[in-house]
Structure formats: C-alpha cells, structure tokens
Amino acid sequence: MKYILFISFFILFFTGCSVKEKLVVKTKAVEFSKIDGFYEDDLNKALEVFKKACLKSSKKEFFTKVCSESKKYNDGRVFFTKYFEPKLLYSPNSDEGLITGYYEPLLKGSLIKTEKYKYPIYKAPEDLITLEKNTKYLDFKEYKYRAKISDGNIVPYDTRKQIEQRDDLEAICYVDDDIDLFFLHIQGSGRVELQNGEILNIGYSNQNGRKYFPIGKVLVQENFVSKDEISMQTIREFLEENPHKKQEIFNKNDSYVFFRKSTKTATGSLGVPLVPKRNIAVDNRVIPLGLPVFIDTKNPITNEDIEKLVIAADTGGAIKGVVRADYFFGYGDKASELAGKMKENGKLYVLIPKVF
C-alpha cells in the first residue's frame, strides 16, 4: 500500500503542480505510437542504459519495481511499453523548451606547477562545509547550504574570485589553458592528458554553493557577440582575442567547482558513468534522476532529427526549467563541436512507471 500511495503521489506531481520560483509542471498523456521516432529508436540500447541507472535509481521507491522487472528483459520495446506511460512535459507557455549539449573535455596538464602549466584543478577544500537543510540555516538555502567558518561565524563559501586569490588549496594537477579550465567547470568532469601521456579522469567533487551565471550573457549584453551567434566556440574566440578581459568575465560567474581523481570516465549526478547520446542532464525538481525521457530535437550542425529514449542521469547549475535538458554528446572533438553549438528547441516525453 505504501508503494502504491507513493506512486500515486508521483503521478499526481506530473499532472500539474507548482514548485519554487513559480515553476509550473504539467503533462499531457500521449500514446507511444504518437511520439515521432519512438519505435525507430534503438530501444534495446536504451534499456541497457536504464539498467545501469537502476544501480542507483532503484534506491528510490518508485523505481524499485520497474528496476527489478528490467532484469527479466532484453527487448526494450516490450519492456518500456509494458511498464511505463508516456507523458509530454509542458509549461504554461509551450510544449517546447531549450535543449543544449555537453561533453567530456580533454585538457593538457602536469602534476607540478610550471610556467606553462599554471592553472590549478582544485580538490574540495577542507574548510568547505555543507549545512543541514533545516530552518536553522534557511539563510544559506540560496548558497545550497555550502559554507565555511570565519572568525567563529558561519558564512557563505568563497566566490570564484576569492577562491582564485587563495594560495592554500590543494590541486590535483595544473593545466595550460584557463579557458579550457573554465569550460571544465561548466561540464563538471573531464580528462587531463599529462606530459607522459597518462590520462587522469577528473570527476565532480563539490561546489562552492554560489549560483551559476552564464558568461555568454555578458558578451551578448555588452554587444561583443550577438544573441544568435553565442556558443561555446564564439565565447572561446572572444576570450582568446581579448585576454585582458578574461578574468573579469570569468569572475561574473561566482560558481566554482571542485574535482577529484576518478577511476571512471564522465559520471553524472546519479553516480553512474554517462553514455554518449543516451543520457541527459535535467532540472531534478521536474524530472527525477533515473527516469526515462524521450527527447525530440535537432542536430545543431546537420539539422537532422534527434529522436532518442535517454535516461536522466545528471544535473547542472544552468539546467533550470520545465522543458529543459542538456544532451550528453560524449568525448572528443566532434562531441565538443556539437555540444558547443547545441541550442535547439525540443520536446521531452517523460516515461512514468505504471502502478502495478
């Protein structure tokens, strides 16, 4: 009975409710046959990725049954159509939203600081604390409950500018390009190739609690780059051509990410390695991590349809809104190019576990 009540609440949530920041979540029931490209997709591959997500998401009660049942199936079409109900996500304004992209970057680095390799990838600092989420610390809610002790007082943790002025933090390694490092903070994980050819996998460890601010917005506001042309590539181009403005623009984004060495490649917030073109980052106030989502959007270079069943496995400071997703393109130069240019309209169909 408890499970059924929980699932009922889960479905009620997706029939329309308001959350903070006046975010209104609504859905419309659809049939699988009405979703363009659903049956043409490789649903067996989607099932493989779902099973991997179940290693973590099955800890959430509303996934327990479907994750257990997934072990019995190798046919994705049969499994997903039997155990899920598709619903189109929409906001009061539209059933389409913004679909962006991200990737796993490769940086060049060294374990020691040199004149060439001088930009640090920091470990999580010892003075960074996470407060309990209760009424005692409500003032820290906007800082994601991240704080530190200063002169005996609990204060919000340092901004990007303050962190980069410190000399007491421990670095994993040092890289040769501060623009690459800034983009690593946005992507949340990556790889560093050392001088001897060794590859370090760098994973997300923690964050300073400060709100993410997109620096592309500054370039548009100050008419350095037009709104239609803004992309990771045009941002990089401007910063390379205007090195005297780099730090000023970087510091507009107070958010700062700390990293750790990892034995795995890019791993999302769900805690499982990301699969290229089969995982997305979402606003988890809207879409629970682990949920299958059918994405309907366009390739930013070829304009071909991207119609795939993906699994919500990650979050991001810039991924906010009802119909909003960040599509993981994978690793390498092609993935970087696609992710940098991805800024397309799209639809999201969430697959809700049936009550059974």
Image (cartoon, rainbow, N blue to C red):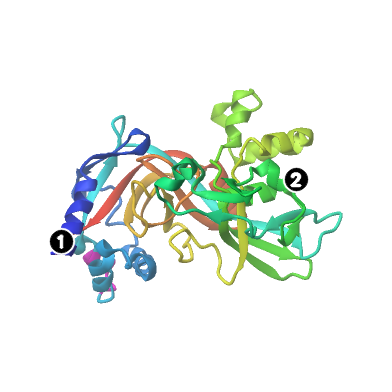
User: Of the residues shown, which amino acid type is indicated by label 1?
Assistant: Ile
Tell me if 347 is positioned left or right of 100 in this view: left
Q: Is residue 303 visible?
A: no
Expressed as whole percent of the image width and height from the top left, the position of residue 265 reads: 56, 66
Q: Nearer the viewer, residue 233 or 160?
A: 160
Looking at the picture, does residue 214 appear above or below residue 35?
A: above
Between the residue at mark 2 and the residue at mark 1, the CA separation in whole angstroms equals 53 Å
User: Which residue is pictured at 80% across the width and 54% down the height?
Assistant: 118
Expressed as whole percent of the image width and height from the top left, the position of residue 278 reads: 42, 59
Looking at the picture, does residue 286 appear above or below residue 202?
A: above
State which quadrant residue 245 falls in. Answer: top right
Expressed as whole percent of the image width and height from the top left, the position of residue 199 reads: 68, 68
Q: Residues within 10 Å of mark 2 (few under 14, many from 20)?
A: few
Tell me if 18 is positioned left or right of 343 in this view: left
Q: Is residue 77 magenta?
A: yes
Q: Residue furthest bottom?
A: 72
What is the quadrant of the N terminus in the image?
bottom left
Q: Residue furthest right?
A: 115
Expressed as whole percent of the image width and height from the top left, the position of residue 7 reads: 20, 57
What residue is shown with label 1? 4
- Mark 2 and mark 1 lie on one chain; the one further toward the N terminus is 1
User: Of the residues shown, which amino acid type is indicated by label 2?
Assistant: Gln
User: Which residue is pictured at 70% across the width and 37% down the height?
Assistant: 237
Specify start and end residues of the magenta stretch as a single range.
73-79
Q: Residue 165 got which mark?
A: 2
User: Which residue is pictured at 56% across the width and 49% down the height?
Assistant: 147
Q: Residues within 10 Å of mark 1 (few under 14, many from 20)?
A: some
Q: Secondary structure at mark 2?
A: loop
Q: Secondary structure at mark 1?
A: helix
